[in-house]
Image (tube, rainbow, N blue to C red):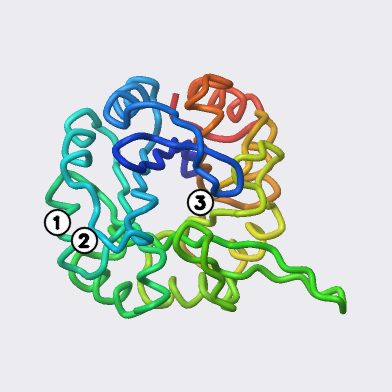
Amino acid sequence: MLTKRVIPCLDVANGRVVRGVKFSADKDAGDPVELAAFYNEQGADELVFYDITASHEKRGIMLDVLEQCAREVFIPLCVGGGLANVDDMWRVLRAGADKTSVNSRAVADPDIISQGAERFGSQCIVLSIDAKRTDEPDGRRWWQVFLNGGRVATGKDAVAWAVEGAQRGAGEIVINSIDADGTREGYDLDLLREIAGRVEVPVVASGGAGKLEHFTQAFAEGQAHAVLAASVFHYGTYTIRQVKEHLRDNGLPVRL
């Protein structure tokens, strides 16, 4: 049985790691290079580095910060933000990333997924989806894709987009719940189940972790393959080890 992955996330803006609630990103959480080294030592299974303002500011990713982080990390490093084409993907892979994550650009140009998968392999292409729940008057519930750090609504169905992304060659899907982000009230389990049941690639839960049981629920109820969190790790609520021990004690396989 594959082990369950625990992944800290570095949301970087202006060279600093930031956190907030529902994508507000208004709190400084530290230096990305120092945090990368810290999580590497703590036993994280992977590290995600998002340049969260690159797309909104219409610029490329901060390669200098990425290169410094990559020198401190000996676990898989996934990098996203401001990747406009496969050449940008190549630049971050050459700078030390193991995976590239696309979000806003993939919605505008879905071919970037298939082009990246063809050039580098699906294992290097992650589709990150920022989704917000919509409850219709007739009782129907759906999740809409948002872009540019939750600033722009697309009218696009998040579940259908995840299915399309996997069909185009994405080797992994990261589901960021805007409703749950930073609230520490738990992952959006309904959204996770919907997507995990429709795609054959790993699904990573993101947004909402606040208690140890939230991590267990993401796997057991949301059918996720990995959990991503930020605030609970950055501010010392839990360590990577504590989360993994909790998962182990609840019968889930982890790498300690």
Which x, y percent locates residue 176?
Answer: 54, 54
Q: Label 2 belongs to which residue? A: 89
Q: Label 1 belongs to which residue? A: 91
What's the amino acid at mark 3?
Answer: Val
Say above or below: 253 vs 190: above
Which x, y percent locates residue 243?
Answer: 56, 26
Residue visible at 35% across and 61% down? Answer: 55
Question: For the residue labelled by badge 1, is the local secondary structure a helix, a strand or a loop?
Answer: helix
Question: For the residue labelled by badge 3, is the local secondary structure a helix, a strand or a loop?
Answer: strand
Q: Is residue 91 left or right of residue 123?
A: left
Residue visible at 29% across and 38% down? Answer: 15
**N-terminal-most mark, 1 or 3:** 1
Crowding at label 3, few (<14), some or many (≥20) Cα neighbours within 10 Å? Answer: many
Residue visible at 24% across and 48% down? Answer: 98
Marks 2 and 3, how far apart at CA? 20 Å
Which x, y percent locates residue 65?
Answer: 21, 38
Q: Is residue 59 left or right of residue 154?
A: left
- In the image, which disc is placed on residue 204? 3
Residue placed most toward the observer, 32 or 77: 32
Crowding at label 1, few (<14), some or many (≥20) Cα neighbours within 10 Å? Answer: some
- In the image, which disc is placed on residue 167? none
What's the amino acid at mark 2?
Answer: Met
Q: Are marks 2 and 1 in contact (CB under 8 Å)?
A: yes
Residue visible at 67% across and 29% down? Answer: 211
